[in-house]
Image: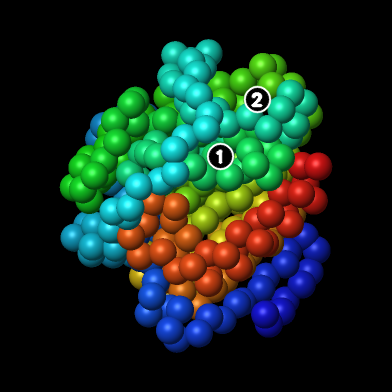
């Protein structure tokens, strides 16, 4: 691991993987970045009029980055609950009074692989609540996922994420809580940090950047961003723009850059890169333990 820079509040590290690990890699994911990353409000005035965001590549190339795992996830250990906004979420409990984590699915939706990720977090000592931003629908094809991602109402999604935080703090009495998401969910993890000043930790795996420093000034949570230098949808220049905006906004953050493609750690990806994913997950565990325990 090479330390490129360490400042306050920023720490940036660049990690290299073997060529074999990269070739074994996952390129499946969700919403990504553009050459000039967009800085937009949390809710569009007309969410049905906007285009689906595909980042620095066109829609066909974006869909080609996604491949759903064909194996079955382990049986779910948690339960479905109704949130105060009327949505349904999956909860895996560590115990009353344990810290909480809002888990935000990638572009496939709340499938069994995301439920299993919530179970893993619960086994690590966190009350995990996996939200459903697709209203009960789950995609199995890139076209279906693209349609579902484009149908998300930003204001409604923001309300659902607030309701998930409320469940953690009021029902499970979490003294602290964080958020984590991949791709589409990674972007929403960042947006949750913007919308919820009470958030205590934010983890985003290659999520859509926000590059408006003024908007980011509402963020109070320390942030861990994980990206791949081979990502064609969120290129290094877009990560640099996010880094600069976070620094300007005074947000405490760490950005990890792996020599890997987009979506190398997706729990639902058919192109999972085990070595990169495990290295990143080790960093996530250390970060969450530091900020939430």
Side (left or right) of 194 relative to 176: left
- Residue drawn at point x = 45 percent, y = 86 percent: 19
Residue sticking out furthest to the front: 75
Residue 97 appears anywhere in the view: yes
Q: How many marks?
A: 2
Query: Looking at the image, is mark 1 or mark 2 earlier in the sequence?
Result: 1
Looking at this view, is 226 or 43 the one in front? Answer: 226
Identify the secondary structure beneath mark 2.
Answer: helix
Disc number placed over residue 168 in the picture, else none: 2
- Residue drawn at point x = 73 percent, y = 57 percent: 286
Residue count near mark 2 (Cα–Cα under 10 Å), binned few <14, some 14–19, many ≥20: many
The colour scheme of the drawn protein is rainbow
Side (left or right) of 251 relative to 141: right
Residue 186 in the image, given as x and y percentages of width and height: 50, 49
Side (left or right) of 260 relative to 252: left
Residue count near mark 1 (Cα–Cα under 10 Å), binned few <14, some 14–19, many ≥20: many
Residue 261 in the image, given as x and y percentages of width and height: 41, 71
Q: CA distance from mark 1 to mark 2?
A: 15 Å
Q: Quadrant of residue 113?
A: top left
């Amino acid at each position: 691991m090479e330390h490129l820079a360490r400042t306050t509040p920023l720490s940036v590290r660049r990690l290299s993987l073997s060529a074999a690990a990269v070739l074994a890699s996952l390129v499946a994911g969700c919403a990504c970045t553009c050459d000039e990353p967009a800085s937009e409000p949390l809710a569009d005035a007309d969410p049905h009029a906007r285009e689906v965001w595909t980042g620095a590549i066109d829609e066909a190339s974006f869909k080609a980055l996604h491949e759903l795992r064909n194996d079955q996830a382990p049986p779910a250990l948690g339960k479905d609950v109704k949130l105060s906004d009327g949505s349904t979420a999956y909860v895996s409990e560590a115990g009353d009074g344990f810290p909480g984590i809002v888990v935000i699915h990638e572009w496939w939706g709340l499938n069994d692989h995301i439920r299993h990720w919530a179970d893993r977090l619960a086994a690590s000592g966190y009350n995990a609540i996996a939200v459903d931003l697709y209203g009960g629908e789950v995609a199995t094809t890139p076209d279906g996922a693209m349609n579902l991602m484009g149908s998300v109402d930003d204001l409604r999604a923001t309300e659902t994420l607030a309701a998930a935080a409320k469940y953690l703090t009021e029902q499970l009495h979490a003294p602290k809580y964080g958020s984590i998401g991949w791709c589409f969910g990674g972007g929403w993890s960042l947006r949750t940090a913007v919308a919820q000043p009470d958030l205590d930790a934010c983890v985003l795996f290659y999520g859509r950047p926000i590059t408006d420093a003024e908007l980011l000034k509402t963020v109070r949570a320390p942030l861990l961003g994980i990206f791949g230098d081979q990502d064609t949808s969120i290129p290094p220049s877009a990560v640099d723009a996010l880094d600069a905006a976070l620094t300007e906004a005074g947000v405490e953050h760490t950005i990890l850059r792996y020599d890997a493609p987009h979506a190398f750690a997706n729990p639902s990806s058919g192109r999972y890169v085990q070595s990169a994913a495990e290295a990143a997950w080790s960093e996530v565990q250390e970060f969450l333990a530091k900020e939430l325990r």
